[in-house]
Amino acid sequence: MAKKLNPQQSDCVSHDGSALVVACPGSGKTRVLAHRVSHELHRLESRRGLVAALTFTRKAAEQITSRLTGLGTKSDRVWTGTIHSFALDWILRPYAPYSDRLRRGFRLVNESEERQLLQTFRTQHDLGPFVPLLKGFDRDGALVPQDPDPLAAATAYHAHLQASRLIDFDTVLFLAYQLLMTVPGIAETLGAMFGAICVDEYQDTQDLQYGILAEITTSSNGGCTLFVVGDPDQAIYTSLGGVAWSSNQIRESFGLQQLDELPLTGNYRSSQRIIDFFTHFSDHEQPIVSLADYSAEHGSITFDNQSVTRAQLPNHIGQLVVDHIQSGIPPNEICVLAPQWRFVVPMARELAGQLPAVPFDAPGLSPFRGEYENVWFKLARLLLTDPEPRRYRTRRRWAADLAREFETLTGIQHSYSDPATLLRCINAISSDEVEGCAYLLDAFAQTLTNLGIDIESHDRLRQLHAAFFDGARANLANADFGIPDTVSAFRRCFGASTGVVIDTCHGIKGQEFDVVICFGLLRGRIPNWSRIIPKTPLDSLVSPEAEANRMLYVISSRAKRHLHLIAEHGHVTANGVPYDTTYEVPEGFAYDVL
């Protein structure tokens, strides 16, 4: 272990007791988290003890699990996933009979359904396109405060979900918290089962999420250790309720006698010049040192301040992409960032049309968006990934998860409960269909036949099947997506990125690239108008200056050696006033000239 960890990392992993780790970008927090999970497993006295590793995204959960596999850690005693998935797997599904809302059955609404429902209620309540509609709950079950019209729309939306026996992720959190508060035995059971809870990206954790975890650790009477990792400077999800609690707040709320704050200040990602630039946007004075092999490289940092017009922007970005590829940088080491999702697809189309020989990837453009907890997504993932030796452990883990889901949904234990058996069954599926949805329909039917499952005999399985395909077809029909309905396109959704990534500033958190190009550095986008002119209480939690600094910190810290910032000219407000450049971009920095 010592050979793989630097002294700071090793101190965090071996620290005795609960800890809050403040980790700078590129400091290896995923490695530290994985080693800590492995360390906690060795520490547990009971062979029945479990460790939970909670992440902000599914992708981060996969990274943790992959690292644990590399460490030789047995996965049967580790639960890894998002806190929403944790609440579903460990609280809502096993304890649904204790909930008036859940005991008659429920289904998690998929993202496509949710988007359509929200639009329906926005229209019914005459909400304009830029009026925020918040649908989260506080600990008492009250909807997040907002103006009367959006509050009425959110109330109607949740009433529809309840009448239809549907729940969304906001409801998952509240119902899980409610169960823990009304049935104390649940928290006590979980506190006894889990000897440690490790939390990634704690700065993005919502109050209800803190509440859920606090009930479990408090009920353990000191038996459950808490290990949280994150970076307050990267807290860019306050509009969704994310809040970076202080060590004192966490210690008191979680009933911990001690919670030590530990630093990770070595950056393995970026050159020192990139680090010196993004620390302009930090609230903390702790110096960050580059530990990268190329720490002393000059690289390039450019800032086009209103010199590129809106019409010239795609050509300008395209030329930057070509120049870096010609210099020897692989396409998948280049990232183009937009401040908001609505600018991603137009830019992707422009660049793809302009540079047909260059591969591009827009990770958010998937026909399966919002279906990640659906059993049929889990089967599709196995069917659409090749059974290569390097993927065997990952696919076996997916198969084990799928086997458990099939058992839960059918109530019957079959031979396919063994993941290796299920994997062999899935690997043997063959179909001549070339259209994506048609292929999956055929492959799903073959799988059910081979497993001896009659879908018509299982209502929940049939409902989830319909929801999966309804969501996929809705995404395929969405003009903004532009996704072809082909098997090859579907397979690419699960393959490693090979092209230039085009995404939002929020979408690339946790990732790194040799080259980062970000456009739209305009006041009203970074920071968003909602910060400049607050429309909800959540918008008022962070000042416009702090929001801009956090966004610029995240954007700049994704880059290893090259960073290009662009504030294009030609955008105007609804009143015809030209957009200003984001105020927080430092003008006195020694930028390079292209």
Image (tube, rainbow, N blue to C red):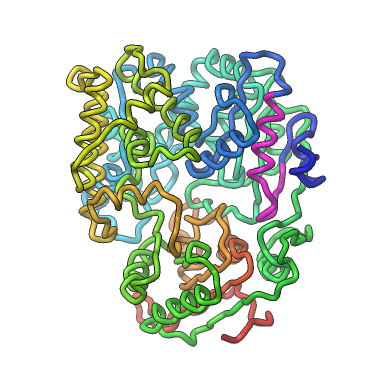
User: Is residue 153 at all visible to an observer of this figure?
Assistant: no
Residue 40 shown in magenta: yes
Image point 45% across, 77% down: which residue?
317
User: From what the image shows, is residue 380 above or below residue 244?
Assistant: above
Residue 357 shown in magenta: no
User: From what the image shows, is residue 339 above or below residue 21?
Assistant: below
Image point 36% across, 27% down: which residue?
424
- Left or right of 522? Residue 252 is right
Determine the image quadrant of residue 484: bottom left
Picture quarter with the N terminus: top right
Along the line of sight, the residue nearer the viewer: 137 or 80? 80
Indicate the position of residue 474 as horizontal and vertical percent values.
22, 48
Indicate the position of residue 38 as horizontal and vertical percent values.
67, 30
User: From what the image shows, is residue 452 above or below residue 558?
Assistant: above
Indicate the position of residue 368 as horizontal and vertical percent values.
32, 45
Indicate the position of residue 313 as horizontal and vertical percent values.
41, 80
User: From what the image shows, is residue 73 above or below residue 307?
Assistant: above
Look at the image and give the residue range highlighted in magenta.
Answer: 21-41
Determine the image quadrant of residue 46: top right
Specify the principal SS of the magenta part: helix
Image point 33% across, 30% down: which residue?
426
How many numbered marks are there? 0
Picture quarter with the C terminus: bottom right
Along the line of sight, the residue nearer the viewer: 105 or 432? 432
User: Is residue 26 at all visible to an observer of this figure?
Assistant: yes
Along the line of sight, the residue nearer the viewer: 135 or 80? 80
